[in-house]
Image (spheres, rainbow, N blue to C red):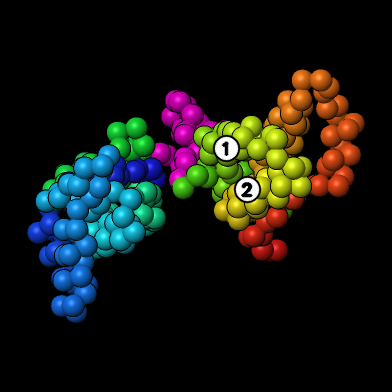
């Protein structure tokens, strides 16, 4: 069993006393501790008004992600390893990145027990589970995608960190888990490319090409993993269509045909997807 959960960003309501007590376990240098305290009390400029909050870390602050990660390490990671795992019937694993995490269980009853107490644990420290992203997912592989009782099909996918995890068969006819770009992340990337092409439609073509190449290479750097080449190829194809659409609107007098646009692509080609992580040959 896997639980795809997300913690809402309620770090602005964390009491300073709780945060200081947790930091005291990891930071013993008094000079560093005093610097962190001064940073927390420095105030926040919101719409021209200087505020001095008495709880939490300032939103957008450079130190906020670090303090939040230290806070969640104590609230979730240590608690799960020291108190939860010894009480479970089977093996389990917690995978967390910032405030997103997935917990894997071997037995359904273990997942139900942890899901029952997880909300209480986070509520104790001023955090809440995201109601839409927190759900149990039966990620066991079934060739027919149906339960042993012949009921509803198993949910065979879940999203985590922008990827959709799904069961597929490899080229060696083995059942493996692959990661594909999640549909919402794909739509978000395509919308960003479309908006960028709209803003820079009157730039020089050379400058437009450089900007699009940087956007695509940044996308490949994160989503360029083995098994995801089809989604990346679709993004390049759609990026070309958006670029052509906005180049046509540079002038009202004439339209840019696809033949002319292909000549532009011959001189300024968009980068092809590159896989930063490949499969190991069995």
Q: Is residue 246 visible?
A: yes
Specify few, some or many for label 2: CA neighbours under 10 Å numbering under 14, 14-19, or 20 or more.
some
The quadrant in which the N terminus is found is: top left
Magenta residues (range): 137-160
Residue nearest the observer in this picture, 211 or 223 = 211
Is 157 one of the magenta-colored residues? yes
Alpha carbon of mark 2 to alpha carbon of mark 1: how far?
Answer: 9 Å
Is 76 one of the magenta-colored residues? no
Residue drawn where x is 76% and y is 47% of the image: 206
Indicate the position of residue 128 as horizontal and vertical percent values: 23, 41
Look at mark 2 in the image and give the residue it sits on: 215
Helix, strand or loop status at disc 1: helix
Specify few, some or many for label 1: CA neighbours under 10 Å numbering under 14, 14-19, or 20 or more.
few
User: Quarter-wise, where is residue 17 in the image?
Assistant: bottom left
Quick one: which residue is furthest to the left in this view? 17
Q: Is residue 241 visible?
A: no
The quadrant in which the C terminus is found is: bottom right
Give the mark nearer the N terminus: 2 vs 1.
1
Task: Judge whether 256 appears above or below 74 on screen.
Answer: above
Residue drawn where x is 53% and y is 39% of the image: 185
Residue nearest the observer in this picture, 102 or 54 = 54
From the viewer's perspective, tell me whether residue 125 is left or right of residue 5: left
From the viewer's perspective, tell me whether residue 106 is left or right of residue 68: right
The answer to the question of whether label 2 and label 1 lie on touching residues, with beta carbons closer than 8 A, is yes
Indicate the position of residue 151 as horizontal and vertical percent values: 44, 25
Residue nearest the observer in this picture, 27 or 170 = 27
Indicate the position of residue 268 as horizontal and vertical percent values: 81, 47
Look at mark 1 in the image and give the residue it sits on: 192
């Amino acid at each position: 069993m896997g639980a795809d959960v997300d913690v809402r960003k309620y770090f602005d309501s964390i009491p300073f006393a709780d945060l200081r007590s947790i930091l005291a376990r990891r930071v013993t240098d008094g000079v560093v501790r005093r610097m962190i305290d001064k940073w927390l009390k420095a105030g926040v400029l919101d719409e021209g008004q200087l505020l001095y909050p008495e709880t939490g870390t300032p939103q957008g602050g450079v130190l906020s992600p670090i303090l939040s990660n230290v806070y969640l390490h104590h609230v979730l990671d240590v608690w799960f390893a020291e108190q939860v795992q010894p009480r479970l019937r089977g093996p389990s694993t917690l995978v967390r990145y910032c405030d997103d995490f997935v917990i894997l269980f071997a037995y359904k009853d273990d997942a139900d027990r942890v899901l029952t107490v997880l909300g209480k644990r986070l509520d104790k420290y001023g955090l809440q589970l995201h109601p839409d992203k927190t759900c149990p997912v039966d990620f066991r592989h079934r060739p027919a995608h149906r339960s042993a009782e012949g009921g509803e099909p198993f949910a065979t996918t879940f999203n985590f960190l922008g990827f959709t995890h799904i069961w597929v068969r490899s080229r060696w006819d083995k059942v493996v888990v692959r990661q594909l770009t999640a549909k919402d992340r794909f739509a978000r990337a395509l919308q960003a490319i479309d908006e960028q092409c709209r803003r820079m439609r009157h730039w020089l073509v050379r400058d437009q090409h450089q900007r699009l190449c940087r956007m695509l290479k940044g996308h490949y750097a994160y989503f360029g993993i083995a098994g995801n080449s089809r989604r990346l190829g679709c993004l390049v194809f759609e990026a070309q269509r958006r670029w052509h659409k906005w180049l046509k609107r540079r002038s009202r007098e004439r339209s840019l045909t696809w033949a002319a646009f292909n000549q532009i692509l011959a001189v300024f080609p968009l980068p092809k997807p590159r896989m930063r992580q490949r499969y190991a040959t069995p």
